Amino acid sequence: MARTGQQLRRRTAAAIGSRSTPDTAAVARGRSGRLRYWFDNSMSRGTPALIAWLAATTAVLIVVFALFTALLGLRPGHGLIYNLFYALLHALDPGTVGGDTGSWQFLLTMLVLTIAGLFIMSALIGVVSAGIDNRIANLRRGRSRVVETGHTVILGWSHAVFTIVRELAVANESRRRPAIVILADKDKPEMEDELHAKVPDLRGTRVVCRTGSPIDVADLALTAHAAARSIIVLSPDADEPDTAVIKTLLALTHGGDGEAPIVAEIQESGNLEAGRLVGAGRAALIDMRETAARLIVQAARQPGVAAVFTQLFDFEGAEIYFVDEHPFAQATYGQAQLSFMASSLIGVIDVDGTASLNPAADEIIGGRTLIVVAEDDANFESPILGAVRVDERAFSEDATSETASASSLLIGWNRSAEMIVREMDGNALPGSTLTLLTSFGTPAFPPLQNLIVSHEACRTTDRAVLERHVHPGLDQIVVLCYSDDLPVQEADARTLVTLLHVRDILGDNGPAVVTEMLDDHNRQLAEVADVDDVIVSDLMLSLMMSQLSEDPRLVPVFADLLGGAGADIYLRPVGDYVRIGTATSFGTLVAAASRRGETAFGYAAEGEVPIINPAKSETFLIDDRDRLVVLANG
């Protein structure tokens, strides 16, 4: 029994001993793993951690060799401090070994130290070089946060960005250190190269590009949009562009950061209400298709009006300003018109913020804000009541009667065409006709009241087809691009071929020809075809967005100009206002137009680009082919 107990105790002790051995090994492996894990984490911290490890290794190497040299007396007469310094020189500079003297043991020790230092310095140079390369790569990727205030932020990337940057550069000339920040899901160097190529003269404005998604809150923070002066949201080239724009508006307004006004593009009218809802009262939304359609219809009704819109919308020359303080509280609109010598009064802003263009001449202005067209707000003139002299003897009593178009030809089709047809129907007399020629697309006509529409599917670049439909008896011809079915350049190329045929068929006679272009560079080529007006939709919309980003009060003004119920721009025969053959001041023309319930603000000589906002003292020799640029209600 005793032997059995001893055997049991031996077996138990053996079992315990056998279990203790693997436990100790596991603990050792655990400590080694934790140490390796800690080392790996420290190395993953980047260049500073690597440099720190190399510095620590160098320090250990120097101390070890200095102690070895001092303890063994390899360099007699020198203490530990001197040996530390001497070891440091060998570790950092391999050339130091060439000047060593002493015993062969000392020389061999210094050679080994120099070789070890050479490896460490090579590694250090590689680490520093890699760190610098990574830093430069990060900077080129555009992921650093912008530190700007009072700048303009552009979110997204499209062809419109070049026009917007160019216009903002002009507007920023009077500002100190102006900046534009662009955030787009595009490579930063690529954005910078394209901007440099297409907008070479930034007039002192700095453009900062950042790579990121406009719908990502973290990426938006890179632009410092909360401290911006204004924000422009571009419509992306995607299947659902309005969805991306609305998401961007949500990202901008979700935290309540900043009060900068926002200007955004919306392609489908049905998404306007959703955009206004998430815009939180800060966003001015531009209906791209409806705006383009109304511009085309107005240009078709009034040849030359596109040039007027371009001059009003860009920052070169005359543009629209607002006058809050003025001496016209008791004066009428007609009297105030003749109180600006170098500016043109075109309307007022009501108390509720609504724009009223071309109000009645006898309407009292009161305390409302004035809307004027002027060259520069920096040198804005002080109006003087009754400053303009008027020669009433030059007034004409004859006026030609203008009627709506009776027959029209529409060539081409895209998503804006339905709105164009609807606008043409609203401006036509009952019984008017519209012939539609298309190569692509499936026309869908809205309910029409005045137009009788006929449609023919054909090759719109075919000369024989065009000869059947193009003739001088038409009242207007509109050529649209196939933007929904063809790439930009191919669509513009087809449009140019069509224009050349149309102009050749018409010769020197015939109606106005208005066309739509996608690329502004093709507009110059279209001038060869002697087109009355070329509407570059992206250009016009870009100009409007630039203006709205600088002054949100323009929203109701543009709505009135391009709306269906407000005043429209007309280029009417100057003989309707003053006698032909007389030398007449522009002030007299303004008074003559006011007498007819219209607002004159420009003059278009035959074959010349309209002059917007000439001085009231400027004199014109009246020709029966000249036109007066006026705002009129129908």
Image (cartoon, grey):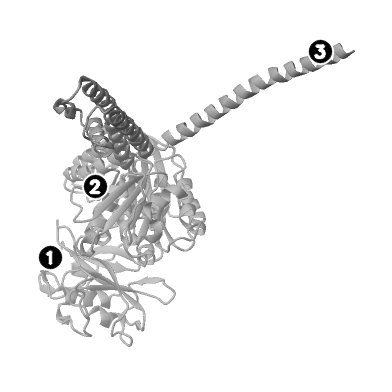
The answer to whether one can see residue 288 in this image is yes
Report the side of 155 relative to 397 (left or right). right
Report the side of 95 relative to 474 (left or right). left
- Above or below residue 58? Residue 317 is below
Q: Amino acid at mark 3?
A: Gln
- Give the residue drawn at x 53%, y 27%: 32
**Rendering quarter of residue 340:** bottom left
Judge depth for marks 3 and 2 and give the one in front: 3
- Above or below residue 130? Residue 398 is below
- Give the residue drawn at x 29%, y 54%: 180
Q: Secondary structure at mark 3?
A: helix
Compare marks 3 and 1 and give the one earlier in the sequence: 3
The answer to whether one can see residue 419 in this image is no
Categorize mark 3 by other alpha carbons within 10 Å: few (<14), some (14-19), many (20+).
Answer: few
What is the CA distance from the residue labelled 3 to the residue labelled 2? 125 Å
| Callouts 1 and 2 close, C-beta under 8 Å | no
User: Which residue position holds label 1?
Assistant: 623
Q: Amino acid at mark 1?
A: Asp
Q: Secondary structure at mark 2?
A: loop
What is the CA distance from the residue labelled 1 to the residue labelled 2? 24 Å
Count the labels in the image. Answer: 3
Q: Amino acid at mark 2?
A: Pro
Residue 95 image offset from top left, x and y in percent: 17, 28
Compare marks 3 and 2 and give the one earlier in the sequence: 3
Q: Nearer the viewer, residue 39 or 630?
A: 39
Residue 602 image offset from top left, x and y in percent: 21, 67
User: Which residue position holds label 3?
Assistant: 7
Residue 431 image offset from top left, x and y in percent: 41, 53
Q: Nearer the viewer, residue 580 or 79?
A: 79
Specify the quadrant that holds the C terminus.
bottom left
Per the rendering, the mark at residue 472 is: 2
